[in-house]
Image (cartoon, rainbow, N blue to C red):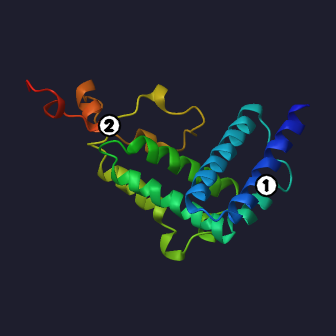
Amino acid sequence: MNDSQTKKNKEKTITIRLKEVAKETDSITQREEFIDIVDEIIDLWTENRKAGTTWTPGFQGEVAELLKLTENRASLYLYLAECEEYALKSATSGFYASCSMLSKIHILTEEFIPLSEIVHPNDIETLEVIEETYLNYADDIPPIPHDKIPSWVPETHSWWRIPTRHDMSKEEIEERLYEIYPEDWDPNY
């Protein structure tokens, strides 16, 4: 099987899974499946970038229509809400997860469908609110070493580089990231 056919098969699998997840009645399964599908889309998007290829004709439109399905919109809302929740925990353990989710949401909305077409008008600015949250915590967010930023993240996703305190000690970073404090476990502290 050649690369073109492999890509078409992956795209077909994504569209089938988006149709199936919209029919899922268990909300936890639906949420987990949706997250997996988003990751598959990002993986294929990354492969396209590396190979200098584009989506198969019609794929973007089909995904856009499937994302408009009520159940998939609800899953995207939950994903967006989780991203925002992690952003609020940026000064501790949430920054990396939130950045990753925000990058994926940006890719989905840039490649397939504008956020304004799938969220309530009151929620259109959520992505900007998340980025503002990072800016508000910039001095407290443990910095992510450049080599720990996923290779698929576009350079334009500058929120990964928002932390301003690059002088944090390893201990302080670990305390913030893992919310581990010596007094919690060291009886001699």
Q: Is residue 108 left or right of residue 145?
A: right
Decide if residue 169 is in sight here: no
The residue closer to the viewer here, 84 or 103, is 84
State left or right for residue 69 relative to residue 120: right
Front one among 1 and 111: 1
Q: Residue at x 49, y 33 (%)?
A: 149
At 35% from the left and 34% from the top, the residue drawn is 143
For residue 30, which numbered disc appears in the image?
A: none
Question: x, y percentage for residue 116?
Answer: 59, 69
Residue 184 vs 27, above or below: the answer is: above
Q: Residue 71 falls in which quadrant of the image?
A: bottom right
Task: Report whether 153 appears left or right of 10.
Answer: left
Q: Secondary structure at mark 2?
A: helix
Q: CA distance from mark 2 to mark 1?
A: 37 Å
**In the picture, which quadrant includes the N terminus?**
top right
Name the residue located 38 percent from the left edge and 45 percent from the top edge.
94
Residue position marked by numbered label 1 in the rendering: 16
Q: Is residue 127 above or below residue 153?
A: below
Tally the marks.
2
2 vs 1, front mark: 1
Amino acid type at circle 1 is: Ile
The residue most toward the left is: 188
Percent x, y for residue 98?
Answer: 45, 48
Q: In the image as oriented, which residue stretches furthest toward the right?
A: 1
Amino acid type at mark 2: Leu
Image location of residue 31, percent across then percent down: 57, 56
SS for callout 1: helix
Q: Between disc 2 and disc 1, whose residue precedes? A: 1
The residue that disc 2 covers is 177
User: Does 108 appear above or below 139?
Assistant: below
The quarter of the rendered structure image containing the C terminus is: top left
